[in-house]
Image: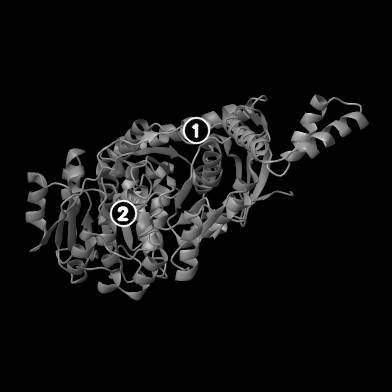
Amino acid sequence: MIDSFSELELSEEILDALADMDYVTPSPIQAKAIPPLVEGKDIIGQAQTGTGKTAAFALPLLDKVEVQKKHPQVLVLAPTRELAIQVSESFQQYSKKKKGFLVLPVYGGQSYSLQLKGLRRGAQVIVGTPGRVLDHMDRGTLKVDELAAFVLDEADEMLKMGFIEDVEKVVANVPPTCQIAMFSATMPKQVKRIATKYLKDPEEIKIQAKTTTVEKIDQSFIRVNHSQKVDVLTRILEAIDFDGVLIFTRTKSATLEVAEKLEARGFSAAALNGDMNQVARERTIRQLKTSKLDMVVATDVAARGLDVDRLSLVINYDIPQDPEPYVHRIGRTGRAGREGRAILFVTPREGRMLSMIEKSIGQKIEPMVLPTSEDVELRRMERFKEKVVDVFSHQNIGYFTKCAYRLSEEMNMSVEELAPALLYLAQEDQPLQIPKGPDLKLPSNKKGEDRGRDRDRGRDRDRGRDRDSGRERDRDRKKGRNDRDSDPKRSRKTKEFGGGEDYDYTTYRLAVGKMDDIQVGNIVGALANEAGLESQYIRNVKLNKSYTLVDLPSGMPKELMNHLKGVRVGQKKIDLKESKD
C-alpha cells in the first residue's frame, strides 16, 4: 500500500507543488496508475468520476515534458469545455515549480485567435474537446507528430455525446511511439475496440467505486464568485445559528487569510494548517472544544483526526478536488448522534465537481438562498435581546435604573425618549444595523440550466456552425453595445448592478496593454469572472501600449476592488486603479 506521493517516482518539482497543495496520500487510482505511466507503459484506467484521475495522469506525464522544447508533447481529450478547463487548471497547479511550462485549453465557443496565440507561444500540453482539437489539426495549427503522450479522459462520456468518431480520428494521427492512457468509468464495446486497436499491451487498472451517504447532515450549496466568498461567508455566519464551525480551504495560506478576515469582522476564529507545530495545533483544537474559539479554518490534511462534538456546521469555502475529501469534511459534524449542517461554496466553473460529489454520495445537494441584509439585522437584534435578558436574569441593575431616571430629569426627557440613544451607545462596537448599499449579486443557483449550457458548449463537432454562430454573437454583442452607447439614458448609468439602483461609471486604469500580448476580450473576460459582472457592464475598454482604460460601475465594494488589483491577465497583475487622466 502506498501511503505517500513521495513513495512514487515523481520529481522534486512535482512533490514540492503537491506539498504546497497539502496533497499527501495518493488515491487508489493514482497509486496504481502513476507507476506504469512513469515507466512509459500504456494503461486503461477504469474508475468512477471523482476518484482523482486527473492527477493520476497529469503528475507522471508532467515529468516527461521537456520545457525547453516549444511544441505539443502531451495531448488530453476531454468531453466538455468545463472539464477541459478544469484539467488545464490542474496541470497549471501541479507544474508551478516547473519554469517555462505552458498548458493550453482549446474548446468550441472560445476565440480562435486566443488559441492560435497560445499554440504559437509553444504550449507543451494541450487539453481540448474533440471537435476543436480535430479542427486545429485539420487547419495545421496543432501539430501532433512529436507527441510523447496522449490521454483520453472519460472515454464513455465521449461515446454518449457522439464524439467517438472524432476521438478515433485524433488517436489515429498520433505517432506510433506515443504513450496512450485511456480512462473511463465503464467499458462499452466501442471504447474497448479503440483500446484494442491503438493501445500497446496496456496495463489494465480497475478501481471499485465507493458510494457513501452521510446521514443526519443537512447539505446545501451556494454559487458564488471567488471574490465574493468572504462576504457570503460572513453573511451566512451572521444569519444562522451554530455552535462550532469548521471551514475548509484548499491551501495553507488561505486558512490564514480567511481566519484573519473573520477575526477582523468580530468572529472568534483561528487557522489550522500543516505549518503549525503540534503544540499550536493542540492548543487551537482545545480552544475549539472548550468554546474559547467558535470557528477553525483548516486544510484537509490539518483536519485529519479532528473530533469535536460541538461542531454543528461545516463550510466548504473551497470545493475539494475530488468527492472523497468532501465526505470526510462534512463527516466532522453530526457527531454523537447529533444533526449537522454542511454548506458548499461552488464557483461558476465548478459545476462539474458538484455533480461528481452528488454522484459519489448518492444524493442531490440542494441550493440554498443567501440570507438577506434584513435577515442579518433580525439575527443581530435577537442576539442583542438575549444579552439584555441575560442581564436582567443575572445582574443587579438597580444603580443603572437610578442613572437612567437621573438622566431623564436632567435632560428633561422621558426614559422612553432616552432609550434609543442608550441603545445606540450599547451597540456602537457591534452595530445592529447594516449600512445600506449595493447587495451581493451572486451567480445563478440553477444547476441543471448551467450544466446543460456547459455541455452544449462542449458539443463542438459541427465546427462550421460553431464559427458561424460565433460571428453572429460578435455582431449581436457589438450591435448591443452601440445601441447602449447611443442611448443617452443608458450612457452614464445602469440599473443592473447592485440591487437595482442607478450607479455612475468610473474609469479605471489597468497596468497591462498591447505590449503584454493581450486583447480586449482578455480584459473583459478576467473582470467578468473575478468581479461577477456581466460583460455588457464592462465598458469603453481602450487598449494602449502599456496600459488599459476601462469604465466599471461605481460603488463596487472596497474588498472587491482590492481583489481586482491582484487579478492577472496573461502573466501580469492588472493593478487596477482609478484613472487620474
Tally the marks. 2
Q: Name the image quarter holding the N terminus.
A: bottom left
Q: Which corner quadrant of the image does residue 206 belong to?
A: bottom left
Q: Where's residue 536, x and y in %?
A: 54, 34
Q: Where's residue 37, x and y in %?
A: 20, 66
Above/below status of 385 relative to 86: above
Q: Badge 2 is on which residue?
A: 127
Q: Secondary structure at mark 1?
A: helix
Residue 277: tell me if it is visible: no
The circle on residue 477 is 1
Q: Is residue 77 left or right of residue 538?
A: left
Which residue type does callout 2 highlight? Answer: Val
Which residue type does callout 1 highlight? Answer: Arg
Q: Nearer the viewer, residue 567 or 344?
A: 344
Alpha carbon of mark 1 to alpha carbon of mark 2: how far? 28 Å
Q: Where's residue 42, x and y in %?
A: 14, 63
Q: Nearer the viewer, mark 1 or mark 2?
A: 2
Q: Which corner quadrant of the image does residue 302 belong to?
A: bottom left
Above/below status of 64 relative to 352: below
Q: Which corner quadrant of the image does residue 504 belong to?
A: top right
